[in-house]
Amino acid sequence: MKITALLVLKVNPDGSDPVILSNASDVSHFGYFQRSSVKEFIVFVGRTVAKRTPPGQRQSVQHEEYKVHSYNRNGLCALGFMDDHYPVRSAFSLLNQILDEYHKSFGDSWRSAQADNTQPWPYLNEALTKFQDPAEADKLLKIQRELDETKIILVSIQPSILSSLLICLVHMNGCLSQHKTIDSVLARGEKLDSLVDKSSDLSAASQMFYKQAKKTNQCCTLL
């Protein structure tokens, strides 16, 4: 079981790109020369999924053994990049706890955030280490019985665009509940290739790596 990254974002109601409020990741299990691109794609995918997670909703983007979990609590959104062995219920218990702790630490100050925060939040880094063991998240679940049962939507990603969404993050495919695809998460007319090209989160090197991986239909495993 592995958690690769935890993020907290502000999701803007006007549909503009979400703002990164906090970001903690562990990419030590990737090749040295891949780590920079991995971090960039974590941010890129994090924004992409958070932007398309409506307020009050939880959803998981899944492929094979990998999942990206997202919980948008009225504009404050927590995401976790985890392998498929990490229990879904434990993952969302952790995301709920992260949002609680963020609110305790910063109140509603996040609502006025206009730019990404590059300063580390110690709690998130500690959580990334502590909750590698889902049993720790299960303890939270026992305490938080009031956690609502908002339906988790598991999103299926078609093979034709698997390289596009989580190139080097997840080789995403699989049939999930409600039979939704990533196309239904994106706005009408949106294409992932275009999002990659326009993203300021991705360096020219990462964009080139993405295009080469897609062209050869290969992808490194990033979670």
Image: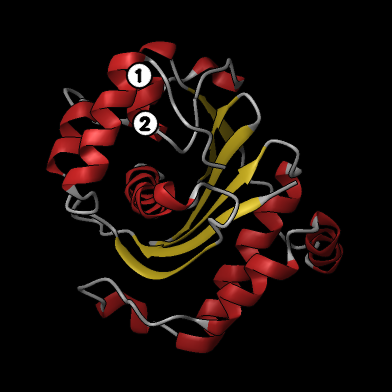
Image coordinates of residue 138 in percent, x first then y, are 83, 58
Query: Can you name the residue that lies furthest to the left here?
Result: 198
* Amino acid marked by disc 2: Leu
Q: Is residue 152 left or right of residue 36?
A: right
Image coordinates of residue 191 in percent, x first then y, are 21, 25
The residue located at (38%, 82%) in the rendering is 119
Per the rendering, the mark at residue 165 is 2
The residue located at (14%, 37%) in the rendering is 197
Q: CA distance from mark 1 to mark 2?
A: 7 Å
Colour basis: secondary structure
- Near-viewer residue (189 or 194): 194
- What element does badge 2 sit on? helix
* Amino acid marked by disc 1: Ile
Image coordinates of residue 95 in percent, x first then y, are 61, 60
Q: Is residue 211 left or right of residue 162?
A: left
Q: Which residue is mark 1?
A: 161
Q: Is residue 155 left or right of residue 88?
A: left
Around disc 1, counting alpha carbons within 10 Å, would you say few (fewer than 14), some (14 to 19), or many (20 or more)? some
Query: Can you name the residue that lies furthest to the front here?
Result: 32
Per the rendering, the mark at residue 15 is none
- Near-viewer residue (208 or 79): 208
Q: Indicate whether 72 appears above or below 101.
A: above
Around disc 2, counting alpha carbons within 10 Å, would you say few (fewer than 14), some (14 to 19), or many (20 or more)? many
The residue located at (28%, 34%) in the rendering is 209
Image coordinates of residue 124 in percent, x first then y, are 57, 73
Visible in this render: residue 148? no
Asked if disc 1 and disc 2 are in contact, CB closer than 8 Å, the reply is yes
Task: Choose top left, top right, bottom left or bottom right for residue 62.
Answer: top right
Task: Work out which quarter of the rendered image holds the C terminus and state it.
Answer: top right
The residue located at (55%, 69%) in the rendering is 99
- What element does badge 1 sit on? helix
